[in-house]
Image: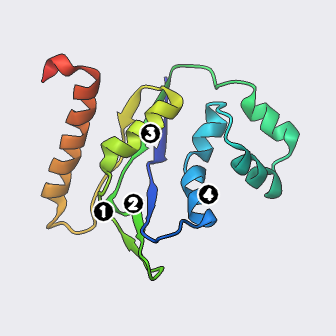
Amino acid sequence: MVVQSESAEFTHELRAERTPEVQLDNKLRFLSLDLLYAHHPDGEVCAYLHKNGLSQQEYDWFMAGEPPGYQIMGNDYYGRNERMILPDSEVVTATDVLGWFNITHEYYLRYRKPVMRTETNVLDPNEAPVWLWKQWANVCRCVMSVYPCWA
């Protein structure tokens, strides 16, 4: 069994017009798992890979198939994993606008792998108890979406 743990992230762009850079960044958050699980990324991400030195032979090696063994997708989530870009271009921590469940659900729909909640914390120890309750609620929501009879 292999647990591949990755940071579950998202950038919210709160401007009237979306920028190509942020849209690409939201696609690149999947890149390591795309390569690990032999999931073909879209054309824009493939162009990014080749522009940044990945050869066609290397790409084909990644896309040849998943690694052996039972694969579990671990998703790390901290409040700083979500960012907001404000209209004036200031970048601030979003904390949990979407939250672990919603972001992890995107990853699940993309890869269809069993999910493991891996890392989390918050920097301010005074916020830690509420943060952990929020994370527990996200895990419960995940379980209830798979096993609604447990509700």
96 above or below 57? below
**Residue 53 in view here:** no
In x, y percent, where is residue 82?
A: 39, 60
Q: Locate residue 63: give its quadrant.
A: top right
Residue assigned mark 3: 106
Determine whether the residue tagged by mark 2 lies in a helix, strand or loop: strand
Determine whether the residue tagged by mark 3 lies in a helix, strand or loop: helix
Q: Quadrant of the C terminus?
A: top left
State how far apart marks 1 and 4 are (Cα).
Answer: 21 Å
Label 1 or label 4, whichever comes before in sequence order: 4
Apparent side of residue 75 relative to residue 136 in the rendered image (left or right): right
Label 1 or label 2, whichever comes before in sequence order: 2
Report if the CB atoms under discs 1 and 2 are less than 8 Å apart: yes
Q: Which residue is drawn at 63% across and 35% down?
A: 36
Q: How many C-alpha atoms fall within 10 Å of the one at disc 3: few (<14), some, or many (≥20)?
A: few
State how far apart marks 3 and 1 are (Cα).
Answer: 18 Å
State how far apart marks 4 and 3 are (Cα).
Answer: 16 Å
Residue assigned mark 2: 82
Q: Which residue is drawn at 82% across and 40% down?
A: 58
Residue assigned mark 4: 24
Residue assigned mark 1: 95
